[in-house]
Image: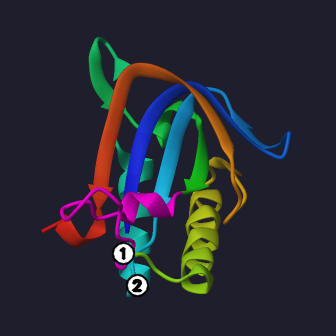
Amino acid sequence: MIAVVSRVKSAHVTVDGEETGRIKNGLLGLLGVQKGDTEDDLNYITSKTAGLRIFPEDGKMARSVLDTGGGVLVVSQFTLLGDVRKGRRPDFAAAAGAAEAEDMYEKCVEAFREMGIDTQTGRFGAYMDVVSVGDGPVTILLDSKKRF
């Protein structure tokens, strides 16, 4: 599982002109699910994201989204799994199938909610307009397969 996590002042997502999620200060998380991802991968991504100390305190990155009471906007993005090492067209062979990916995406959203985080979403599988106002900018790449 791969996540690109950005600290934002605000972010929202719309599908066909309908807003599906909006947060103020918090994190925008773009989530890509790989074939064979497990609950262990999911737990790593959600706990690491929630605990990232990337919010400022006394001039240092010292607080997490849990500490600040910020929100998380989770957007599914299978293109994070695009392999462009050969040629110019991304190869998505590593991406999980739609059913597997949607299940893991929903579990990710639920995990953040169970932590008490205001969690908003895009719409799985839809073409989305994602708008964010970066804060910093601060962006972190998490890959559950590269944690050791």
- Which residues are the magenta region? 77-94
Task: Give me the disc on residue 41.
Answer: 1
Main secondary structure type of the part rendered in magenta: loop
- Which image quadrant: the C terminus? bottom left
Q: What amino acid is found at the position of numbered circle 2 in the picture?
A: Thr
Spot occupied by residue 111 in the image (x, y as percentages of width and height): 57, 66
- Which of the 4 quarters of the picture holds residue 33? bottom left
The vertical placement of 147 against 116, above or below, is below
Q: Which residue is mark 2?
A: 38
**CA neighbours of label 1 inside 10 A, class few (<14), some (14 to 19), many (20+):** some
Task: Kindly check if marks 2 and 1 are in contact, taking CB atoms under 8 A apart as contact.
Answer: yes
Residue 20 in view, yes or no: yes
- Which image quadrant: the N terminus? bottom left
**CA neighbours of label 2 inside 10 A, class few (<14), some (14 to 19), many (20+):** some
Q: What amino acid is found at the position of numbered circle 1 in the picture?
A: Asp
Q: In percent of the image, x 44 and y 82: which residue is there?
A: 39
Lateral position of residue 47 relative to residue 87, left or right? right
Q: Indicate yes or no whether the magenta region holds residue 11.
A: no
- Which of the 4 quarters of the picture holds residue 40? bottom left
